[in-house]
Image (cartoon, rainbow, N blue to C red):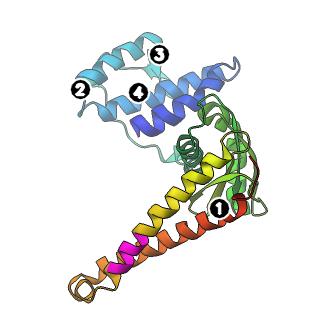
Amino acid sequence: FAWDEFCSFYVEMLKSRLQDQSARPVAQRLLAHTLDVLLRLLHPITPFVTEEVWQRLAEYAPERGIDRPERAAESIMIAPWPTADPRRYDPQMEAQFARFQEVLRAVRDVRARHNVPPRRMIRFSVRCDAPTAALLEPMAVYFGPLAQAEPTGWGPAVQPPALVAAAAAPGMEIFVDLAGLIDLQAEIARKKQELTKLQALMESKQKKLTDPAFLQKAPAAVVQQHRQSLQTLQEQYEALQRWLAQHAQSPN
């Protein structure tokens, strides 16, 4: 949580609010409160680091809390152990943030796989059901600061662009528009190599699953795992074949 959700997501998302003079006081209070609680939770594991950060935090936010800010303990060693406040739990917000993270990670993964320069803006869309689209819509403004990405739409009617890199998440298909971002012929060559690798993996799985000795000796769960793995490889192979059929004759 400390490294991934708090640092990679929450702090980054908060930067725009910290630049807004009207939203800044509340954003600062929430940030200080969250860091306060996080430090107390981490203190038994990293005592010296948390004490140092606690002292630095006191310089900027000596009083902390959400509803009624109070002066923090002089040392984290004598600060009370934090307790959960059920009033702060919002299941819908949890679901919304989880969906946002899934899409953001998929977009970042596509950017990395295709070596898109970090400062180059990319466009993407998400095919999903209407409830998921309703969760994602309010999060649209955060994709730019966190991934240099611009959403162009979400919902069940979304169709992939002509030159696309696709990624999947539970109940969602994420389509990144690669037009103008990659060399099409180089991408075709890369996908053909990937197709060859998938073919070799599928043949290896099929050979094992037709080996009587393996089927007799291996636990049923292991056999089932190999079958599911083969099915996943076949789906990836078919998806690559469809992509190549669509783009192999396309001009650069």
Amino acid at the residue labelled 4: Asp
Q: Nearer the viewer, mark 2 or mark 1?
A: 1
Label total for image: 4
Q: Earlier in the sequence, mark 2 or mark 1?
A: 2
Residue placed most toward the observer, 17 or 124? 124
Residue placed most toward the observer, 60 or 80? 60
Q: Residue furthest top?
A: 59
Amino acid at the residue labelled 2: Pro
Q: Which residue is mark 3?
A: 61
Label 2 residue SS: helix
Q: Report the span colored magenta.
A: 201-207
Mark 4–mark 2 distance (CA, rounded to whole Å): 14 Å
Mark 1–mark 3 distance (CA, rounded to whole Å): 57 Å
Q: Nearer the viewer, mark 3 or mark 2?
A: 2
Q: At x 52% / y 48%, what residue is drawn? A: 89
Label 1: how many Cα within 10 Å (few below 14, some 14–19, many 20+): some
Q: Position of residue 142 (x, y in %)?
A: 65, 36
Q: Residue furthest right?
A: 157
Q: Which residue is mark 4?
A: 36
Mark on residue 244? 1
Mark 1–mark 4 distance (CA, rounded to whole Å): 52 Å
Amino acid at the residue labelled 1: Leu
Q: Earlier in the sequence, mark 1 or mark 3?
A: 3
Left or right: 49 in relation to 104: left
Mark 3–mark 4 distance (CA, rounded to whole Å): 10 Å
Residue placed most toward the observer, 100 or 109? 109
Callout 1–callout 3 Cβ contact below 8 Å: no
Q: Which residue is mark 2?
A: 47
User: Looking at the rendering, in which quadrant would you find the N terminus?
Assistant: top left
Q: Is residue 120 visible?
A: yes
